[in-house]
Image (cartoon, rainbow, N blue to C red):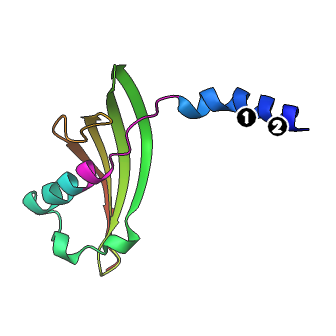
């Protein structure tokens, strides 16, 4: 039994060691909130950050430790309005802010 467990662990271990894409949602999220404010789309102080939905749509490796990341954010304000934004930026394991963030408002809905 111990040999089987050891064989399974040794077989799975290389998979665990593979490099994975960076976890860099904070950079595009913060830059997008600033963009929403600067574009007069919404006041970021009116956003309910606890309700923000974050989805990594794609992460493509361009070269060693450089990724293009595409995120979908859904921001909610305190009145229940929503702002759907897609972002694109470059990131690495060491640095999330390698490039500027391109933000695209894909929809906004108002409850009133």
State how many labels appear.
2
- The C terminus, quarter of image: bottom left
Query: Which of these two is toward me, 20 or 28?
Result: 20
For the point 29% across and 44% down, the residue is 87
27 lies left or right of 37: right
* Pointer 1 with pointer 2, Cβ within 8 A: yes
Q: Is residue 101 magenta?
A: no
5 lies left or right of 106: right
Q: Quadrant of residue 109?
A: bottom left
Q: CA distance from mark 1 to mark 2?
A: 6 Å
Residue 32 at x, y = what percent? 21, 53
What is the secondary structure assignment of the residue under circle 2? helix
Which region shows up in magenta?
Answer: 18-29
Question: Which residue occupies the extreme front position in the image?
Answer: 2
Query: Which of these two is toward me, 71 or 63?
Result: 63
Query: Few, some or many C-alpha atoms within 10 Å of disc 1 (few <14, some 14-19, many ≥20)?
Result: few
Q: Mark 2 sits on what residue?
A: 5
Query: Few, some or many C-alpha atoms within 10 Å of disc 2 (few <14, some 14-19, many ≥20)?
Result: few
Residue 38 at x, y = what percent? 8, 59
Q: Is residue 26 magenta?
A: yes
For the point 33% across and 50% down, the residue is 25
Q: Quadrant of residue 3?
A: top right
Relative to 49, residue 15 above or below: above
Question: Which residue occupies the extreme top position in the image?
Answer: 63
What is the secondary structure assignment of the residue under circle 1? helix
Name the disc covering residue 53, or none: none
Name the disc covering residue 9, or none: 1
Question: Which residue occupies the extreme left position in the image?
Answer: 38
Residue 71 at x, y = what percent? 36, 45
- The N terminus, quarter of image: top right
Relative to 29, residue 24 above or below: above
Query: Which of these two is toward me, 55 or 110?
Result: 55
């Amino acid at each position: 039994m111990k040999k089987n467990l050891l064989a399974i662990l040794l077989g799975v271990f290389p998979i665990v060691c593979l490099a994975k894409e960076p976890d860099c949602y904070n950079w595009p999220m913060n830059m997008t909130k600033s963009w929403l404010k600067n574009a007069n789309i919404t006041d970021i102080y009116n956003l309910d950050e606890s309700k923000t939905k974050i989805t990594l749509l794609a992460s493509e490796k361009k070269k060693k430790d450089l990724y293009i990341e595409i995120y979908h954010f859904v921001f909610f304000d305190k009145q229940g309005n929503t702002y759907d934004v897609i972002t694109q930026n470059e990131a690495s394991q060491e640095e999330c802010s390698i490039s500027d963030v391109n933000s695209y408002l894909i929809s906004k809905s108002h409850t009133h």
